[in-house]
Image: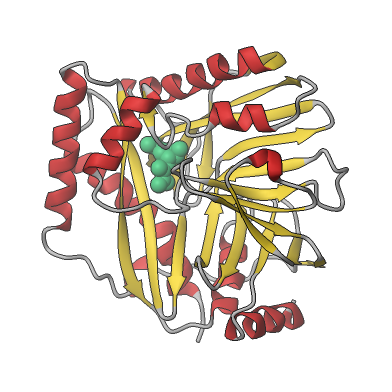
C-alpha cells in the first residue's frame, strides 16, 4: 500500500492523471492510469477504463483508459474516529440563512405545483495540510462499505469521495441499481422510524427508476425499501434489478441520470430550477463514476456510482459538496442540519488524516 501511495503522490506532483478506487465491501484498491479523453457520447467509451461524468449531461464526460494498472490488498481499517469539528470550517455567518431561504423558496414553488421535489446543494470550503495519500488512507479506513475513490487530472484537479449510492452495475445481461433517499442521523440503531416526508421523497426516486427502466430493459423488479447506514447517516434504500436488452448499458444510464435522488421531479423542471437557483456549478458532484469493463470482470461488466459525499481538492483547499431533497413538507432548519451532517462525511476524513 505504501509503495502505491508513493506512486500517487509522485504522479500528483508531476501533474500526471490517475484514478484509484475500491468497490463497496471489497478489500482491493485498484489503480489505473492512461490516456484520458473527454467524450460527448457514452457510445464512444471503449473499455477497459474509468468513466467520470458530470451532473450536467450537456458537459463532457471524462474517460481514462486502463493502459497501466495494478491492485493492492488492503489491511483492516485502523483509524480511530475523532470529531469533524477539528477541521477549520470556513462557513460565513450567512451561509445557513442563505441555504434556508433557498429551501423555503423551493417549498413554496413545490406547494404552488411547479414541481414535486428538488435537490438543493451547496459547496463548503475548507483548508487542510495533510498529504492526499494520507487522506485517501483515512477515507478507505472510515468507509469500508462505500465506493471510495481518488481521481486526479491536472484540468479537473483531484476528486475524492465515499459514495453510498449505486447508479448501475451490470454483469453479463443482468443489471442492478438502487433508489436511495431520505436521511436521518445514525444513533447506534438501524431499526428506526421514517417520516412521511422521507418515505415520499424516496418513493418518488423508486417509481422514477422503475418507469425509466421499463422501456429500455427486458425485465425489471424491485425489493421493499430498507434502512441502510452510510457513515453517521441512515438512508432508505430499495434494490432494483433486471435484465438488459442487447443494446448494453448506455441506454440505461441515459434514462437513469439524473435520478430524483440528486435532481428532483419532474426531472427537467428540477434541473432548470437547480441551474437557476443553486448559484454555483456542481461539476462532478451528483454526476457518476466508476470502472467500465475493467479486469477481474469480463468486458461487459461495469459499476457506476453517484458522485456523493465527495470533495474537490486543489492544493490545500478542499471543496465539500452536499445537498438534500426538498419536498412540500421540508423544514428549512432540518434541511440545513441534514446537509451539515452530510458534510461531516468528508470533514471527518480530513480531520482523521495524520500529517
Ligand atoms: C444529495 C445528496 O444525497 C442524496 C440525497 C438524499 C436525501 O435527500 O435524503 C439521500 C441520499 C442521496 O441520494 C448528498 O449527499 O449530497
Q: Where is residue 117 in the image (x, y as percent from the top left)?
A: 31, 26
Residue 351 is left or right of residue 67, and the answer is left
Nearest to the observer: residue 43 or residue 350: 43
Figure check: 229 above or below 8: above
Image quarter in which the N terminus is found: bottom right
User: What residue sits 30% from the left and 75% below the top?
Assistant: 88
Total labels: the figure holds 0
User: What residue sits 46% from the left and 24% below the top?
Assistant: 205
User: What residue sits 38% from the left and 61% below the top?
Assistant: 320
Residue 32 is left or right of residue 231, and the answer is right
Q: Where is residue 77 in the image (x, y as percent from the top left)?
A: 65, 66
Q: Position of residue 131 (x, y in %)?
A: 53, 83
Q: Quadrant of residue 110?
A: top left
User: What residue sits 50% from the left and 45% below the top?
Assistant: 287
Figure check: 31 above or below 107: below
Nearest to the observer: residue 22 or residue 315: 315
Nearest to the observer: residue 203 or residue 152: 152
Q: Position of residue 184 (x, y in %)?
A: 38, 39
Please indicate, yes or no, whether residue 198 appears anywhere in the rendered image: no
Figure check: 102 above or below 248: below
Please indicate, yes or no, whether residue 280 appears anywhere in the rendered image: yes
Figure check: 21 above or below 322: below
Figure quarter occupied by ligand 1: top left
Residue 355 is left or right of residue 320, and the answer is right
Colour scheme in the image? Answer: secondary structure
Nearest to the observer: residue 113 or residue 78: 113
Residue 191 is left or right of residue 243, and the answer is left
Amino acid at each position: 500500500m505504501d509503495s502505491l501511495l508513493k506512486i500517487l503522490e509522485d504522479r500528483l506532483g508531476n501533474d500526471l492523471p490517475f484514478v484509484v478506487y475500491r468497490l463497496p465491501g471489497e478489500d482491493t484498491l485498484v489503480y489505473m492510469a492512461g490516456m484520458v479523453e473527454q467524450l460527448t457520447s457514452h457510445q464512444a467509451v471503449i473499455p477497459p477504463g474509468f468513466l467520470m461524468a458530470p451532473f450536467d449531461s450537456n458537459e463532457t464526460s471524462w474517460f481514462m483508459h486502463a493502459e497501466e494498472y495494478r491492485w493492492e490488498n488492503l489491511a483492516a481499517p485502523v483509524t480511530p474516529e475523532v470529531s469533524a469539528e477539528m477541521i477549520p470550517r470556513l462557513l460565513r455567518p450567512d451561509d445557513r440563512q442563505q441555504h434556508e431561504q433557498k429551501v423555503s423558496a423551493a417549498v413554496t414553488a413545490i406547494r404552488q405545483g411547479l414541481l414535486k421535489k428538488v435537490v438543493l446543494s451547496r459547496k463548503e470550503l475548507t483548508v487542510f495540510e495533510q498529504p492526499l495519500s494520507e487522506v485517501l488512507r483515512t477515507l478507505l479506513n472510515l468507509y469500508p462499505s462505500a465506493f471510495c475513490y481518488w481521481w486526479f487530472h491536472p484540468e479537473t484537479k483531484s476528486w475524492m469521495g465515499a459514495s453510498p449510492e449505486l447508479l448501475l452495475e451490470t454483469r453479463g445481461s443482468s443489471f442492478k441499481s438502487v433508489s436511495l433517499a431520505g436521511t436521518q442521523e445514525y444513533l447506534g440503531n438501524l431499526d428506526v422510524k421514517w417520516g412521511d416526508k422521507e418515505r415520499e421523497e424516496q418513493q418518488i426516486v423508486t417509481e422514477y427508476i422503475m418507469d425509466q427502466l421499463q422501456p429500455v430493459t427486458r425485465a425489471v423488479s424491485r425489493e421493499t425499501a430498507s434502512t441502510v447506514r452510510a457513515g453517521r447517516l441512515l438512508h432508505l434504500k430499495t434494490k432494483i434489478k433486471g435484465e438488459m436488452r442487447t443494446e448494453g448499458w448506455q441506454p440505461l444510464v441515459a434514462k437513469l441520470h439524473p435520478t430524483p435522488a440528486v435532481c428532483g421531479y419532474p426531472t427537467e423542471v428540477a434541473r432548470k430550477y437547480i441551474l437557476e437557483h443553486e448559484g454555483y456549478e456542481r461539476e462532478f458532484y451528483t454526476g457518476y463514476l466508476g470502472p467500465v469493463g475493467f479486469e477481474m470482470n469480463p468486458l461487459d461488466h461495469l459499476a457506476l456510482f453517484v458522485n456523493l459525499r465527495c470533495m474537490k481538492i486543489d492544493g490545500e483547499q478542499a471543496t465539500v459538496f452536499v445537498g438534500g431533497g426538498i419536498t412540500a413538507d421540508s423544514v428549512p432548519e432540518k434541511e440545513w442540519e441534514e446537509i451539515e451532517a452530510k458534510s461531516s462525511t468528508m470533514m471527518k476524513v480530513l480531520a482523521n488524516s495524520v500529517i
